[in-house]
Image (cartoon, rainbow, N blue to C red):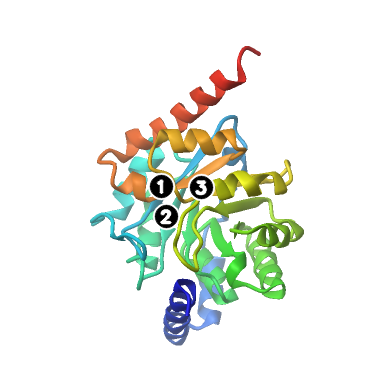
Amino acid sequence: MSVLDGILAGVREDLEERRRRTPLAELRARVADVPPALDPLPGFRAPGVSVIAEVKRRSPSKGDLADIPDPAALAEQYATGGAAAISVLTEQRRFGGSLADLDAVRARVGAPVLRKDFVVDPYQVWEARAHGADLVLLMVVSLDDVLLKELIALCGELGMTPLVESHTAGEVERAVATGAQVLGVNARDLTTLTVDRTVFRELAPLVPADRVRVAESGVAGPDDVAEYRSWGADVVLVGEALVRSGDPRASVRAFADTANAANARAAGPA
């Protein structure tokens, strides 16, 4: 069993428990009372590189990353620093997240909010919208084409934006074929947890220029963001480096500003 297989097994167990507590009909009723989802695309398509800043307590590869007693306060720091969106990990067993974290962040910030989890069932998309998420992560590696398209269509029905994530050329091809506008390339192989940032450099050219390219994983500092930008990233998703930075507001700002300045110098005079 790969690392990803183990994570997904736990996700499915926890999903069934939540489904027993909260039937889908109840989620649908909640969604009817939630304000419309925010559109992240204007921020993602703004000049330069944008940052999705992540509320992340723990990871399977690094263990505990940061004590985050108040995820809403952290998200507010991110937003003040200029984050284009806030990512909230809601998987509990390996990442220490929860839907309560999502609720807290949504109540505090005006920026678009991404529910980052291992989505394997339409119930989780309804759940994300009921808790105020504007975007949801869909990982090609864990979904067949039929379910992937079903989930993307449901996002459209609910006014949400799917972030469709790939790690291989074949997965990028499948992601592009769905017509999704926001396509992520994860430098981390979720079956082994190894990270190779050049995966983004190799795969980004396979993503059409009219889509938003999101670089995920492998960011330790501003120079890494600048390199991702030079390889074609419109957006960079950063978690560990921000929660460990000591000054999340300044770090978000520095990541974007340093990357944009470096790429402006590389481009030379207009």
Label 2 – label 3 distance at C-alpha: 31 Å
* Residue 40 visible in rendering: no
Q: Secondary structure at mark 3?
A: loop
The part of the image, by quadrant, that contains residue 123 is bottom right
- The residue closer to the viewer here, 162 or 28, is 162
Q: Are marks 1 and 2 in contact (CB under 8 Å)?
A: yes
Which numbered disc covers residue 109?
1
Label 1 – label 2 distance at C-alpha: 6 Å
| Residue identifier under label 2 | 106
Label 1 – label 3 distance at C-alpha: 30 Å
Q: Position of residue 142 (x, y in %)?
A: 58, 72
Among the two numbered marks 2 and 3 on one chain, the one whose residue lies closer to the N terminus: 2
Image position of 221 (left or right of 150): left
Does residue 206 sit above or below 132 in this rendering? Answer: above
Query: Mark 1: which amino acid?
Result: Val
| Disc 3 residue crowd, few under 14, some 14–19, many 20+, Cα 10 Å | many
- The residue closer to the viewer here, 178 or 197, is 197
Q: Residue at x 42, y 57 (%)?
A: 88
Q: Position of residue 251 (x, y in %)?
A: 35, 36
Does residue 41 sit above or below 37 in this rendering? Answer: above
Could you tell me how many numbered marks the image carries?
3
Q: Position of residue 241 (x, y in %)?
A: 35, 45
Among the two numbered marks 1 and 3 on one chain, the one whose residue lies closer to the N terminus: 1
Query: Mark 2: which amino acid?
Result: Arg
Q: Residue at x 31, y 48 (%)?
A: 243
Q: Secondary structure at mark 1?
A: loop
Q: Nearer the viewer, mark 1 or mark 3?
A: 3
